[in-house]
Image (cartoon, rainbow, N blue to C red):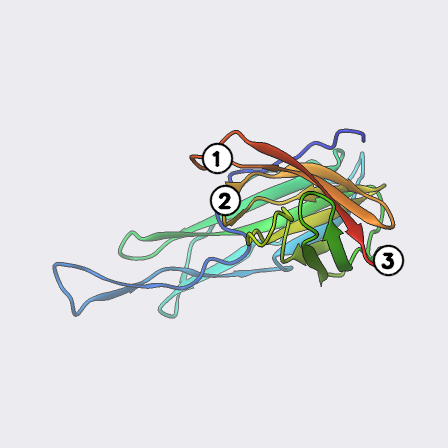
């Protein structure tokens, strides 16, 4: 499998940050609300590779208790290089509380909207655990209820179809802790990736996983 570059800027929170309420210890009657984000253009964007075009960030809007806040983006997208990129948006409310939201951008070989990798897969490692794969976005974002396939351990995840039988497993978290992004591949009947565990006591462990689609 040809290596595919992955451009991840610490994906601590996929998609929108949830709204939380916080009360100061000095004044319990004072409530402060974390910024809520609306990502213009959606949480996931798929763009076909180009040597001439430049990525234009659609931007984001953040509000706290009805007040619009300034938003500061971080991250870059190179449309000439196939891979997955993250733009993270920061906003701070009047009390200094900071929240973030992430947008996933996939730079693909071609328009992958006609590909369909959804279905029920069986793990070929250890016990025959099933994983249901669903298309979350027509342009190549998928979610699955298992990425490891080891007995009944719960390790859900998401991956992105880049075309040319290449995919990227996005960072996630499950029974064995967090795992990092990794390159993978697929055929008409299989999905394959590496689970790289990053939390003690399993940090540093890498597990090759292959899933076979049921007829």
Q: Distance of mark 2 from mark 3, alpha carbons? A: 34 Å
Mark found first going from the N terminus, 1 or 3? 3
Q: Nearer the viewer, residue 109 or 75?
A: 109
Label 2: how many residues lie within 10 Å, few (<14), some (14-19) or many (20+)?
some
Residue holding disc 2: 176
The answer to whether one can see residue 139 in this image is no
Viewer-side label of 2, 3? 2
Residue holding disc 1: 202
Label 3: how many residues lie within 10 Å, few (<14), some (14-19) or many (20+)?
few
* Quarter of the rendering containing residue 180: top right
Disc 2 + disc 1, Cβ < 8 Å = yes
Q: Distance of mark 2 from mark 1, alpha carbons? A: 7 Å
Q: What residue is rendered at 60% in x and 60% in y?
A: 40
Q: Which mark is residue 114?
A: 3
Q: What residue is rendered at 66% in x and 56% in y?
A: 144
Helix, strand or loop at disc 1? loop
């Amino acid at each position: 499998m040809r290596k595919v570059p992955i451009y991840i800027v610490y994906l601590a929170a996929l998609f929108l940050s949830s709204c939380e309420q916080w009360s100061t210890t000095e004044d319990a009657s004072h409530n402060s609300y974390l910024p809520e984000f609306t990502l213009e253009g959606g949480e996931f964007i798929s763009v076909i590779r180009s040597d001439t075009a430049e990525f234009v960030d659609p931007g984001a809007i953040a509000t706290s208790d009805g007040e619009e806040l300034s938003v500061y983006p971080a991250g870059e997208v190179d449309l000439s290089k196939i891979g997955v990129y993250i733009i993270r948006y920061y906003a701070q409310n009047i009390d200094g509380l900071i929240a973030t939201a992430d947008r996933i951008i996939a730079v693909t070989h071609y328009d992958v909207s006609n590909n369909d990798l959804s279905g029920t897969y069986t793990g070929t490692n250890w016990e025959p655990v099933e994983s249901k794969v669903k298309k979350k976005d027509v342009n190549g974002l998928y979610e699955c209820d298992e990425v490891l396939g080891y007995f009944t351990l719960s390790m859900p995840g998401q991956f992105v179809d880049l075309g040319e039988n290449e995919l990227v497993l996005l960072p996630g978290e499950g029974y064995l802790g967090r795992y990092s992004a990794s390159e993978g591949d697929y055929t008409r009947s299989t999905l394959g990736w590496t689970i790289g565990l990053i939390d003690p006591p399993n940090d540093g462990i890498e597990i090759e996983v292959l899933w076979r689609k049921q007829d």
